[in-house]
Amino acid sequence: MKTGSYLERSDVLRMAAAAEAEAASNGWAVTIAIVDGGGHLLALNRLEGAAPATAHIAPAKANTAALVRRETKAFEEQINGGRTAFLSVPTLQGVLEGGVPIMNDGHCLGAIGVSGVLPGQDAQIARAGVAAL
C-alpha cells in the first residue's frame, strides 16, 4: 500500500493568505478557490468587489487543474488554437487560464483557481498561493 501527502488546514490557510496578498498588492478583486487532489472544495474567498460569477468560475478552474494535474492555461490555448471539440470533455468546466495544480514529488495535492482579472493575472495569483506551500 502506498502512502501519500495531503493538504492540511494550515496549508490551505497559508496558500489562501498568500494568494489574497498577491491580489491585494495589485488592487485586484478576485475569487480564490482551493481544492484537494480530487477537486473537492477546501476554501473559497471572494474578495470585496469581485463579480458574483467569479465564485463559480474559480472553483471550476481549481477543480479542472486538480483532476488533470496541469495548469488550465493549456486548455484555453488549445481551444483558442481551434480545438473547440475540447469543450465537450465531460466534467471539466474550468478550461480558462487561472487554475494551477499543487504538486509534491510528482503527486497532485490539489489546486488553486482564481477568477476576476486578466487570465495571466489570475494565474499569477494562483501561483503565489502555491509558492507559499
Image: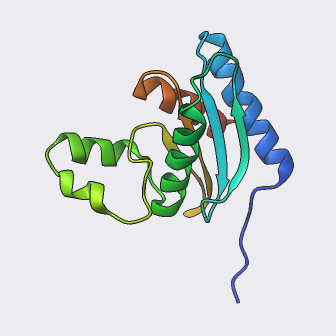
Determine the residue positioned at 73% across, 78% down: 3
Answer with left or right where residue 69 lies relative to residue 7. Answer: left
Q: Quadrant of the C terminus?
A: top right
Is 123 drawn above or below residue 76 in the view shown? above
Q: Position of residue 60 (x, y in %)?
A: 52, 48
Q: Quadrant of the N terminus?
A: bottom right
Is 71 drawn above or below residue 25 in the view shown? below
Determine the residue positioned at 23% across, 47% down: 78
Residue that extends furthest to the front in the rendered view of this protein: 52
The foreground one among 104 and 45 is 45
Residue that extends furthest to the left in the rendered view of this protein: 82
Q: Position of residue 103 (x, y in %)?
A: 58, 55
Q: Position of residue 18 (x, y in %)?
A: 72, 29
Determine the residue positioned at 58% across, 46% down: 59
Q: Toward which corner of the image does residue 131 lie, by quadrant?
A: top right
Is 133 drawn above or below residue 90 in the view shown? above
Determine the residue positioned at 71% across, 21% down: 21
Answer with left or right where residue 44 lies relative to residue 101. Answer: right
